[in-house]
Amino acid sequence: MNRKAIALGLLVASACLAGCSGEPVYKDPAADVERRVEDLLGRMTLEEKVMQVTQWSYGKNMNVNNVETEMKAVSPMIGSLLYRSTSPVFYNQIQRKAMEESRLGIPILCGFDVIHGYRTIFPIPLAQACSWNETLAGESCRVAARESRLSGVHWTFSPMVDVARDARWGRVSEGYGEDPYLNGAMGVAAVRGYQGDDLAAGDAVAACLKHFVGYAYSEGGRDYHYTEISAQTLWDTALPPFEMGVKAGAATVMSAFNDISGVPASANRYTMTDILRGKWGFDGFVVSDWDAVKQLIPQGVAADRAEACAKAITAGLDMDMVDDVYRENLAALVENGTVPGQVLDEAVRRILRVKFRMGLFENPYIEELPDSERYLSTEARAAARELAAESMVLLKNERGTLPVGGEVKRIALLGPLADNREDLMGSWWGQGEAGDVVTIREGLEAEFAGKARIEWVKGCDFEGDDRSQFAVARAAARAADLVVLCMGEKRGWSGENASRASLALPAIQQEFVCEMARTGKPVVVLLSSGRPVDVRGFEPEADALVEIWQPGTEGGNAVAQLLSGKVNPSGRLAITFPLCAEQQPVYYNQRQAARPRSGRYQNLPHEPMYPFGYGLSYTTYEYGPVELDRQTVRRGERLTARVEVANSGSADGKETVMWFISDPVASISRPVRELKHFEKQFIPAGESRVFRFEIDPERDLSFPDATGGRLLENGTFYLHVNGQKVKFELIQ
Ligand code: GLC
């Protein structure tokens, strides 16, 4: 080919690679994202690609379970940082290094565990699920996203949508409970809250569905342990929330620590490639959990770091969190052919795609605002207070103990959580600060100012055997009209690596409740925990019992509003409260048993303490008959169900109608019933509201087989709503 033709070819090639401005295409914001990705990828060296799939951590590590070497300097080529600083000045300095000192100017993607708030801390996710209020849950993520972006965090390692049914597992606090659909619905609300309508907007963060997949099945509820999950259960239960999150546009996914029957999640090609990409068309990227690539060695599938590296990236794991296995081994593995170059290219492509979609190349820097303009706004606090109040579950309320009546002039406020700040935030408190938290004591003093005097005595610690303050607490109780006991868990008793063999509170707390109840005064127990608690040791002594969970920065105010009646409790359990750990597994949607009324423990009642969906109110709701617009439905048609609910009490309130479907005979046995839809509405006292569920056979009556195929079989189905059971047929 003559020189002229070659010159012309290069001219054309560079014109294609350069945008309309003469700049390289990847720098042209007007160019299509995929073109920008390909252009940039084509310019990258092997070393630059390896750095792009590497994440280091930066800043003070608050997760004691993860050991790390303090990073001394940030390489301008690093792909991502697990970023813990809150300083916008510092963030801009780091980002400027990447943009101006690296050859190609690829922005660093900064991620952080914004699990239930960044600086304004919201209730733990399990509590949020008990609100059944996707709008408020989504709003909490909107607030968290804004506070995160103004601090240099573009990406949150949230939502966690692991369906959890073993309360011994500490991370039950971080997901949305025992039901696949509720996990999926709340996960979708979180993804939409974090990402908004435009990922490139300055107040959006990339979401991260985790932990993919099956982590909550860790054997015995022991964290980080192996799991045994059948293919059918994987498709029936563990995967659906992730599919809902992917379909909602989640930008990233995190691989889990566990294995599934001997195949670690971080080397599982079936889940990370065949399912996530092949079936669901996910085009974002997968990040490992902390050290999860290195952990393939102790998990017994890799002899060394090089093998771990090759197995993880070829399975579809794109970014390596912190253990440096990719950075140390990938270049050599690509050069010697063990890892095909296009495998690395595909991982880099996915990461670049998210960075372009986030607009980080155009807007890598942030405003350097003071804390006062970034955090804890009035609106943020209001959102936290509202969600906290709606997440609390009234478990018992006898003799109208609550709401607190006008005759109560003196409240004895007792227990380890009465004047506590940090434990109300729960685990994964992000950048939350204890000093921001409104204690229960402060909340009550504000709410009952001028109405009742609050007499605060701690009286009892979380654990131990110090009874020295019992007497003074008892005296305060005797002098009061109402005793409010604030009991429960420390924030470190749930969360990561916080598995507990027993669900009971320490004996000293149970004894304290009983002692205070012996004064004969009305007793309200406020239970703050990150998991279902075995309440048998003190529940009989309580006139009223409220699960307040770990309600976050505005927890004290939310509790006070509930006790005063300003807010009518509307929380419903998203996870069953077993009688005790030994009663598990005891979740609602168990499969049908050969002898349903038999095979039970001889020495323990069969029913749980409180079932899924349980929760009381200060008012009463009466359900009219569930009506169907037809008794038979065909594929392609919809069957509309409706029910009218009246608020027959004296207090306005919010009611959640939960719609379950059962399929008593199918080619693969189905759970006894499955949540398929829910809706929460405000119903003024004396009024009623209509709730509807439009049943779509393909969506609501089909079920997966062990390969993920969908089966839709004619026959009888039942719709279950608040104790009513209505039959209908699917015909051809
Ligand atoms: C932790 C957790 C994961 C978290 C990650 C980064 O070990 O398992 O949920 O996002 O490391 O902190």
Image (cartoon, rainbow, N blue to C red):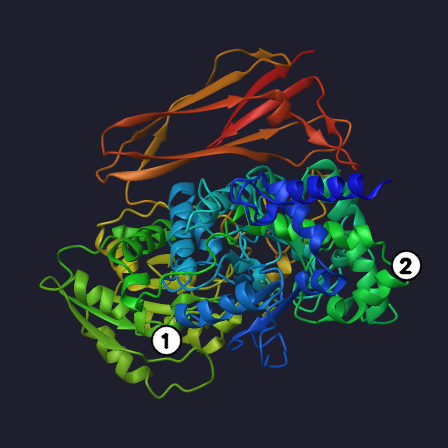
**Mark 1 vs mark 2: which is more N-terminal?**
2
**Residue toward you, 600 or 158:** 158
Q: Position of residue 654 (x, y in %)?
A: 32, 39
Q: Which residue is mark 2?
A: 337
Label 1 – label 2 distance at C-alpha: 60 Å
Residue at 60%, 63% (x, y): give it: 80
For residue 122, the mark is: none
Q: Nearer the viewer, mark 1 or mark 2?
A: 2
Quarter of the image for the C terminus: give it: top right
Identify residue for label 1.
Answer: 416
Measuring 51% from the left and 78% from the top, which residue is drawn there? 60
Q: Quadrant of the N terminus?
A: top right
Residue at 61% in and 14% down? 636
Residue at x 53% of width, y 55% of height: 158
In this rendering, the answer to whether 17 lies above or below 90 is: above
Please state the horizontal and vertical placement of residue 224, each as a whole percent of the image.
Answer: 69, 66
Residue 246 position, x and y percent, is 61, 41
Say whether mark 2 is within 8 Å of ligand 1.
no
Q: Is mark 1 within 8 Å of ligand 1?
A: no
* Kind of residue indicated by mark 2: Gly
Near-viewer residue (319 or 214): 319
Q: Give the quarter of the image for residue 98.
A: bottom right
Quarter of image, ligand 1: bottom right
Residue 497 visible, this angle: no
Q: How dense is the environment of label 1, judged by Cα within 10 Å: few (below 14), some, or many (20 and up)? A: many
Q: For the view shown, which residue lies furthest in the left direction? A: 450
Q: Would residue 149 appear left or right of 413 to someone viewing this image?
A: right
Picture quarter containing residue 662? top right
